Image: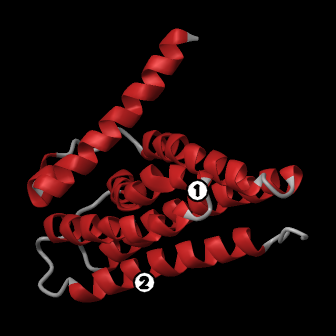
């Protein structure tokens, strides 16, 4: 049990280290980021990072109705995970469309790191009033996306369309996910 906890803590420590590195020197951090071995490694990493946010949402919603909170947290987990994978696929398809060199694992990595601030601060959902701060902090994810697209798609002359499309899909997806999971099973007073 102890080695599993150690690996879990180490994974989160590495994730926060990458966020700090992105803040200090974004373009160099992305260009030096090792490419994942395959897309399944990134999917596994996404799963590990979505889990604490979902648990925090369950605890925050559990004040009113425990079983509804578990269902909504599970739905949040599935929808955010699907959104991250979907944005990764969108980046991959756009890379093919714009004739850029990026593989599917690297596009999933770009999606994951763009969502990382949202997932890292998702623990604030334990208190629904503090959960309001999460979208503000997650704007840093759009900055990570902007920087990574600048580095990864360096051959493209006009990257603004790509950025607007991916950023809009991310923001709209998170907004719809929050509306779906927060609006279901409203507490009865």
Q: Which mark is residue 168?
A: 2
**Outermost residue to the right:** 188
Residue at horizontal 28%, vertical 89%? 161
- Residue pictured at 85% horizontal, 69% vertical: 185
Q: Where is residue 66 in the image (x, y as percent from the top left)?
A: 85, 50
Q: In which quarter of the image is the C terminus?
A: bottom right
Residue 9 visible from this viewpoint: yes
Mark toward the viewer: 1 or 2: 1
Question: Please, what secondary structure does the residue beneath circle 1 have?
Answer: helix
Q: Quadrant of residue 174?
A: bottom right
Q: How crowded is mark 2: few (under 14 residues within 10 Å), some or many (20 or more)?
A: few
Determine the residue positioned at 59% across, 44% down.
51
- Tell me the residue at 74%/57% (across/down): 61
Q: In this view, does 122 lie to the left or right of 28?
A: right
In the rendered image, the vertical position of residue 95 relative to residue 112, given as above or below: below
Q: Quadrant of residue 9?
A: top left
| Residue 44 in the image, given as x and y percentages of width and height | 51, 40
Quarter of image, res 103: bottom left
Point out the residue furthest to the front here.
189
On screen, residue 138 above or below 56:
below
**Circle 2: element type:** helix
- In the rendered image, is residue 31 in sight? no
Mark 1 — residue? Answer: 125
């Amino acid at each position: 049990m102890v080695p599993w906890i150690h690996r879990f803590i180490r994974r989160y420590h590495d994730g926060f280290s990458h966020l700090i590195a992105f803040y200090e020197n974004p373009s160099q951090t992305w260009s030096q980021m090792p490419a994942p071995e395959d897309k399944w490694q990134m999917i596994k990493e996404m799963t590990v990072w979505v889990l604490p946010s979902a648990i925090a949402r369950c605890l925050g919603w559990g004040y009113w109705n425990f079983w509804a909170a578990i269902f909504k947290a599970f739905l949040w987990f599935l929808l955010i995970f699907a959104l991250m994978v979907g944005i990764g696929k969108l980046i991959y398809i756009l890379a093919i469309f714009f004739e850029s060199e990026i593989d599917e694992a690297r596009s999933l990595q770009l999606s994951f790191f763009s969502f990382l601030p949202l997932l890292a601060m998702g623990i604030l959902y334990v208190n629904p009033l503090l959960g309001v701060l999460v979208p503000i902090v997650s704007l840093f994810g759009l900055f990570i996306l902007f920087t990574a697209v600048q580095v990864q798609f360096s051959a493209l002359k006009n990257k603004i369309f790509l950025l607007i499309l991916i950023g809009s899909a991310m923001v709209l997806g998170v907004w719809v996910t929050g509306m779906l999971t927060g609006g279901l099973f409203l507490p009865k007073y």
